[in-house]
Amino acid sequence: MNPSSSDSVSEKHKPQPDVPQVVWHHASVTLEERIARQRHKAGVVWFTGLSGSGKSTVANVVDQMLWKESIRTYLLDGDNVRHGLCATPVILSKDHGESFATRFGLGFGPEDREENIRRVGAAAGLLVGAGLIVLTAFVSPYRNDRQRVRERIEKEYGPETFVEVFVDTPLEICESRDPKGLYKQARAGKIANFTGISDPYEAPEDAEIVLQGGVESPETLARRVIAELKSRHWFH
């Protein structure tokens, strides 16, 4: 080997004093031990679909049904995380000032959406490590972002620990519901980067579960999700 090449490699990997050395700390209680005690598996059930598709509603019903069966769950909802973990600049500026808010706050452009899903995926992974079935309800419009979360979860916790649920509700139904008046504002040009109107939604190509939103009740759709999880032996 060329000596200069060897030197350059060693220098590259040499700890730098101004760079934090980040090392994963392994917990004494393992995920396997948690699963054995609670008698159900842990993983992520990722609901995706247009705004107004019903994904949050169905995810909430699934959460309620599993709770009644003493299955440990947590629901991460797209609106809720925007108040803290993935807060917008406007929300952050109230407590942290404009400079901080500009640097760390997330809007709704493509890169902001990517970071939003990255943060949510990281949080979901930590909850899976605690032994929970994590339900997430996010528009999450880009396939690559959803795929990265899947790969991260399955790399950490093994295959079949990530189930994608596509709530396939036609745009016209979502727009007719418009519970927050967002479609109306988007059509009027008052909201930029609105998925389905001025920003694309990349539908899943191979989701484990596809629900036809707007046709059947949320309870019926939720039972289909639970049946699929049972068939995968997440619980009995």
Image: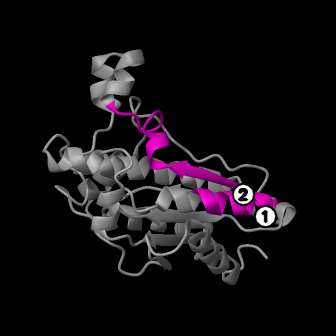
Q: Is residue 3 left or right of residue 219?
A: left
**At 33% from the left edge and 16% from the top edge, which residue is drawn?**
97
Quadrant location of the N terminus in the rendered image: bottom left
The residue under label 2 is 131
The residue under label 1 is 35
Q: Secondary structure at mark 2?
A: loop
Q: Is residue 105 above or below residue 218?
A: above
Q: Is residue 55 magenta?
A: no
Start-end of magenta stretch: 60-88
Q: Is residue 230 left or right of residue 79?
A: right
Q: Is residue 212 visible?
A: yes
Badge 2 vs badge 1, beta-carbon distance below 8 Å = yes
Residue sitting farthest toward the front: 176
Mark with earlier residue (2, 1): 1
Mark 1: which amino acid? Ile
Expressed as whole percent of the image width and height from the top left, the position of residue 124 reads 56, 53
